[in-house]
Image (cartoon, rainbow, N blue to C red):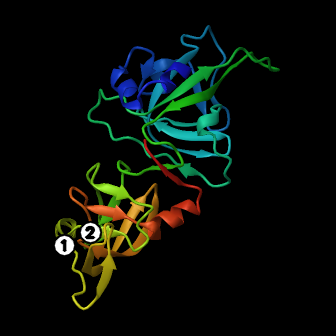
Amino acid sequence: FSSFVLKDIDKIQMDLNYGEGVFKGIKDALPEAKISSTKGIYQDIGPLRLPIFLVSFTSGEIKNERISFKTKLGESINLRLNCRENLLLSPYPVKLEVRDVKGDCDVGDVALIKMGGLESSLRNPTHHAVCEGLIIRYKPKVISVDEEPVKIRDVNGELHQLVSGSVKFDSGNDVATAISKELVNDLRLEPNPRKKRNVTLAGGLKMSCGLIEISIVVRGREFCVKALVGAVGPDTDLLVGMDVIQRLAEEKFTLGTP
């Protein structure tokens, strides 16, 4: 698993194929294994078919030294997490941002599951599973500055996923979060024409911007802010400023690259 760290995550995930030690669920990998909300994954009969394997998941969260996730087969899994890189000692669950898959054969984010050796008990010797690591696009507590998945509400309150790469997080923007006029129109939002704000942008450019209240969702957290209309650069629909970043920082999130 350590060799994976040396490669690009996108390349690793593209090279993964189901049936080669990679599975959509626990029952695909270990048909005789049992899944329990208290015991996790265990097997107490017969030899292990696979002592170690990868399993795709569609959602998940980390709390203290455990990870809970749902496999592509819909199995709800709760295991001890034995991976220092992704270990989070937090009393509150930290939601994992799972990469969107492009089809049923697209593996996506995976957990590395290891079945331990036989553990003696009063009844039967048992193999118990632990999660040894994660191959994930987005790190649990690191916000990607230019590829972070962000959702925004339209005029009816419905959430929409913004196009990847159209959202930027800028710690140098201490004025306000900004939104493009095109996105405002797409969401059918209406700025208050009587509310304007004079701002100085990077490079010294001064402009008068309309203000509009928007609601965005980042890592499962919803933020309502007054955004500047039009104060964004080319190919950017949403420029997230310190009004949101500071609140994320208070929850120990940092900015980085995926």
The disc label shown at residue 68, or none: none
- In the image, residue 136 above or below residue 105: below
Nearer the N terminus, badge 1 or badge 2? 2
Q: Mark 2: give few (<14), some (14-19) or many (20+) Cα within 10 Å.
A: some
- The residue labelled by disc 2 is 154
Q: Residue at x 28, y 68 (%)?
A: 179
Q: Can you name the residue that lies furthest to the bottom here?
A: 194
The disc label shown at residue 188, or none: 1
Q: Which residue is drawn at 67% across and 17% down?
A: 44
Q: In this orientation, does residue 223 appear?
A: yes
Q: Quadrant of the N terminus?
A: top right
Tell me the kind of residue under disc 2.
Asp
Where residue 212 appears, as percent x and y from the top left, is 30, 79
Is mark 1 in CB contact (under 8 Å) with mark 2? yes
- Left or right side of 62 for 222: left
Q: Can you name the residue that lies furthest to the right here?
A: 122
Where residue 17 appears, as percent x and y from the top left, is 35, 19
- Left or right side of 98 for 211: left
Nearer to us in this view, 231 or 136: 231
Where residue 213 appears, as percent x and y from the top left, is 33, 77
Element assignment for label 1: loop
